[in-house]
Image (tube, helix red, strand yellow):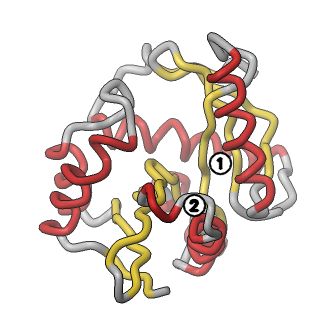
Amino acid sequence: MDYKIASLEEIEKIYYEHMTKDFPPAELKPLNAILNSVKKGWYKMYLASDEDGVKGYACVADCTNHTNTEDEGEKIGFLDYFAIVKPYRGTGVGTEFLTKLKTLGFDCILLETESIESAANDEEDFIRRRRIAFYKRSGCVDTGCMYNVFGVEYNVFINNDIELTEGFLAKLLSAYEYAYAAILRRDDKDYIFRVK
């Protein structure tokens, strides 16, 4: 499997061919917001591909500068989107790709899953439990924190088994909040608050 950073043209192609199908409209940011973040240099889309084409993509925001941790050797990213192209789901590509993200220059990548507690029905509950199980199998750790973002509850995970000291957890949560504010270009905090 080959991994690379997507060009602006590749991002646009992935957005229309895959992201619009892989994510509900309410969860999908406008393409312009994604492209503007990439142009500013703190947001990247990574592609997993082979001779048959793209098998998965991951959008990661670099939150390091905001948390002032670079001098301490703690680079923090936020996994904004992660998906495997439909024919390759359940083949191990996702686990390999998520593991590969650990080598992309971040000490820790934050990710989120919709909370099981807020599932509206059995189908949602099943999908959320499956997603959480996948992250845990891939070595991700639940921080024990939950956020409400635009009325949706998310559990916050990290992709490394790092000791969650009170100080480091505060940096992670600051990075999480910053990622939303920066991507959405909003100064208000009305849309995001910590539940636990």
Type of amino acid at the residue the image marks with label 2: Ile
User: Few, some or many C-alpha atoms within 10 Å of disc 1 (few <14, some 14-19, many ≥20)?
Assistant: some
Q: Residue 171 carries which label?
A: 1
Q: Can residue 16 be seen by looking at this rendering?
A: yes
Name the foreground residue: 15 vs 61: 15
Name the foreground residue: 124 vs 102: 124
Name the foreground residue: 49 vs 171: 49
- In the displayed structure, does residue 108 sit left or right of residue 29? right
Q: Residue 52 in the image: state x and y as whole percent.
A: 35, 82
Type of amino acid at the residue the image marks with label 1: Lys
Quarter of the image with the C terminus in it? top right
- In the displayed structure, does residue 47 sit left or right of residue 146? left
- Whether label 1 touches label 2, CB < 8 Å: yes
- Identified at 18% across, 45% down, the residue is 31
Q: Give the Cα distance between marks 1 and 2.
A: 9 Å
Name the foreground residue: 165 vs 179: 179
Q: Can residue 60 be seen by looking at this rendering?
A: no
- In the displayed structure, does residue 156 sit left or right of residue 164? left
- Answer with the quarter of the image where residue 39 lies: bottom left
User: Few, some or many C-alpha atoms within 10 Å of disc 2 (few <14, some 14-19, many ≥20)?
Assistant: many
- In the displayed structure, does residue 8 sit left or right of residue 82? left
- Identified at 50% across, 13% down, the residue is 151
Q: Residue 67 in the image: state x and y as whole percent.
A: 54, 53
- Answer with the quarter of the image where residue 113 lies: top right
Q: Earlier in the sequence, mark 1 or mark 2?
A: 2
Residue at which label 2 appears: 76
Q: Residue 83 in the image: state x and y as whole percent.
A: 47, 54
Q: Residue 195 in the image: state x and y as whole percent.
A: 69, 18
